[in-house]
Image: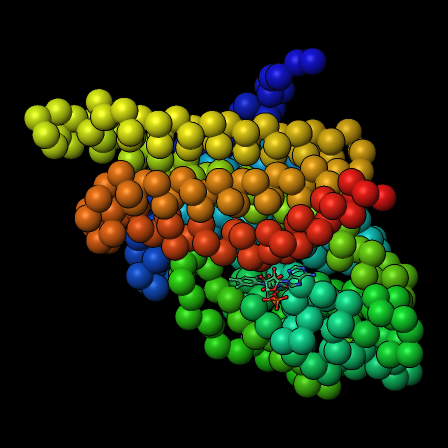
Amino acid sequence: MQFALSEEEALIQETARRFAADRLAPHAEALDRGEGRAALLSNLRDLAQAGFCTLNAPARYGGGEAGAVAFALSVEELGYACASTAVTVSVTNMVAEVVAAIGTDEQKQWALPKLADGTFAAAAFCLTESGAGSDPSAMRLSARREGGDYVLNGEKIYITSGEYAGFFVVWAVTDPQAARGKGISVFLVPADTKGVLVGKAERKLGQHGSSTNTILFEDARVPASALMGRENDGFRTAVAELAGGRIGIAALSLGIARAAMDKAKAYVKERRQFGQPLAQMQGLQWMIADRETDMEAARLLILNAAAAKDRGENYARQASMAKLFASEAAHRATDTAVQLFGGAGYVADAGVERHLRDARITRIYEGTSEIQRLVIARATLA
Ligand SMILES: Cc1cc2nc3c(=O)[nH]c(=O)nc-3n(C[C@H](O)[C@H](O)[C@H](O)COP(=O)(O)OP(=O)(O)OC[C@H]3O[C@@H](n4cnc5c(N)ncnc54)[C@H](O)[C@@H]3O)c2cc1C
């Protein structure tokens, strides 16, 4: 077994690392304070033009065909500098993969080049509703067929990039009589569609630079050509694409964990108490050793899932393991980093508490830790 990145993967990783350090890191704290939206949008455009928003879209529509390993490495590096930008990029890639997987040629021609050249700052994945979170099959948003159109009514909540997405992929009920999960279809809905309204941004614990909005659909009329894939077959797509997205969130978690622990490792070498650097205290060394082991295990699980995806295998179980472990490891790492800084870790200046807040959501979105365990258990016991 060879454990080595290809030349292309290493180059993409290095490019992401440099972009993150030069362009994202300087704005991360301002975004956390709720400022710097213009810089975020400018960074997203440049990230798109550098290929980071359509890493796995087909080349003929402007995509990179770089593979899931390259995607994971990129999101990790971006997340190291700015979790808010990284999650935006991760979700946009996931949406691009939905379009690439089940879109018609016309839909791909319309959507993917605009994501690749930065015309659209982002794209949004509209699945969750107030009554349908961990169980999206309980969704109510309806798409009623009227002549040559579908008319959408209902509401999606907690939609990442809702405010600046150029389009949404929207899951809706097309057959209310069907068994749960059977009568659901996916639509490609341009953000400027009449009757699509973006609600206010949620106030959150972390990742303040990424917008999270309610999207309302009030008699939003789309042509029948907005249907993606087969009618009433959309739920399968949601489940399949979420697995790919989970690799992204796992990689984001690792990026956040690394950022927090790098700051903590530097700090314990400098800070002295009881006449010696903190780094010489064995109790603290063991904390660091445990977190390093966590991060190494997370990295291996992420690359394992991504490599399985790149080989065309069923990777859902590995993706859930990677997301479960990496997000929980990020929680441990960011909490340890705050602890190693002592009081300085709790106040904002050291920039460590931001990582703790940014990490928390990784255990919740794109399937909570409990739902990852459910996926893993079902696959294991099947
Ligand atoms: C910042 C943010 C961004 C988001 N971005 C998006 C987005 O872009 N698109 C989108 O569609 N959604 C998005 N979401 C929604 C997110 O995916 C959901 O919040 C998440 O899946 C959990 O659903 P819920 O909030 O309804 O919690 P619930 O489903 O109500 O769960 C509550 C608790 O019960 C547990 N639970 C539920 N069912 C089970 C079970 N069977 N066994 C054991 N425990 C269970 C859960 O793990 C959790 O601890 C986002 C959410 C946030 C906060």
> Is 226 drawn above or below residue 60 in the view shown?
below
> Depth check: 349 or 132 in front?
132
Query: x, y percentage for residue 8?
Result: 60, 24
Quick check: which quadrant has ligand 1? bottom right
> Depth check: 182 or 65 in front?
182
Query: x, y percentage for residue 266?
Result: 25, 30
Query: x, y percentage for residue 112?
Result: 69, 51
For the question of whether residue 59 can be seen, the reply is: no
Q: Is residue 31 left or right of residue 92?
A: left
Q: Residue at x 67, y 48 (%)?
A: 373
Q: Residue at x 80, y 33 (%)?
A: 312
> Is 327 drawn above or below residue 136 in the view shown?
above
Q: Residue at x 25, y 52 (%)?
A: 346
> Depth check: 192 or 351 in front?
351
Q: Quadrant of the C terminus?
A: top right
User: In this view, which residue lies farthest toward the front?
Assistant: 283
- Count of number-bearing discs: 0
Task: Please tell me in which quadrant of the rendered image residue 148 appears.
Answer: bottom right
Q: Quadrant of the N terminus?
A: top right
Q: Residue at x 8, y 26 (%)?
A: 275
Query: x, y percentage for residue 4?
Result: 60, 17
For the question of whether residue 216 can be seen, the reply is: yes
Q: In this figure, which colouring scheme has been used for the structure?
A: rainbow
